[in-house]
Amino acid sequence: MTTMTPHWERIQVLDGIEKDIITCIQSAGQALQELSKDKSNVKQAETQTNQFLKTLSTVEGRLHEQINYLTQVSTGQPHEGSGYASQKVLQMAWHRLEHVRSRVNELDNLKNTQIAESAVRAPNLAIGMGMGPNMNVMQPQVHPQLMPPNNNDSQNTG
């Protein structure tokens, strides 16, 4: 026995609704055809009309169920068998990630532009700030007073 996914079951329900709509249209057509005859069989026309109304009622109820299901899924309410909410959360997370990447790249480009402009305006200042030949990489400069004492120097002075 094969088990079907909820999505496949929904498709089969819609297929059944489609078949009922076809039956409904056929019943209406047969009723109209019977009534258009010179000597129409009223009993036959009533039977086809009743079949039309019964099928139409069934179609309306089943379509209403499908619309309710779609309303629940599209509003993000939890629903058994629905992965829509999880997909939406994932999609929004990817969107936020791409936005952050874009913004970081913009800020990086702005930083590089500012560094390049300051190097053009005051090249000696940029070198004094620890900028090496590659202006995109800051090289740390440690002030001599902040250096840890050298053990060899303290032994020689004492």
Image (cartoon, rainbow, N blue to C red):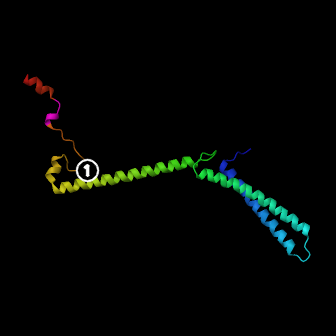
Which residue does the image show at 90% across and 69% down from the upper left?
42
Horizontal and vertical percent for residue 83?
59, 47
Q: Is residue 100 above or below residue 34?
A: above
Q: Quadrant of residue 54?
A: bottom right
Horizontal and vertical percent for residue 26?
80, 66
* For residue 86, side relative to residue 16 (left or right): left
For the C terminus, the image quarter is: top left
Which residue does the image show at 89% across and 67% down from the upper left?
44
* For residue 100, side relative to residue 150 (left or right): right
Which residue does the image show at 80% across and 62% down from the upper left?
53
The kind of residue tagged 1 is Asn
Q: Nearer the viewer, residue 41 or 130?
A: 41
Q: Is residue 94 above or below residue 32?
A: above
Residue 62 forms part of the magenta stretch: no
Q: Nearer the viewer, residue 154 or 40?
A: 40
Tell me which secondary structure the magenta stretch mostly adopts: helix
Q: Secondary structure at mark 1?
A: loop
- Span highlighted in magenta in the image: 144-148
Q: Quadrant of residue 157?
A: top left
Which residue position holds label 1? 136
Q: Is residue 52 above or below residue 12?
A: below
Q: Quadrant of residue 140?
A: top left
Horizontal and vertical percent for residue 97?
43, 49
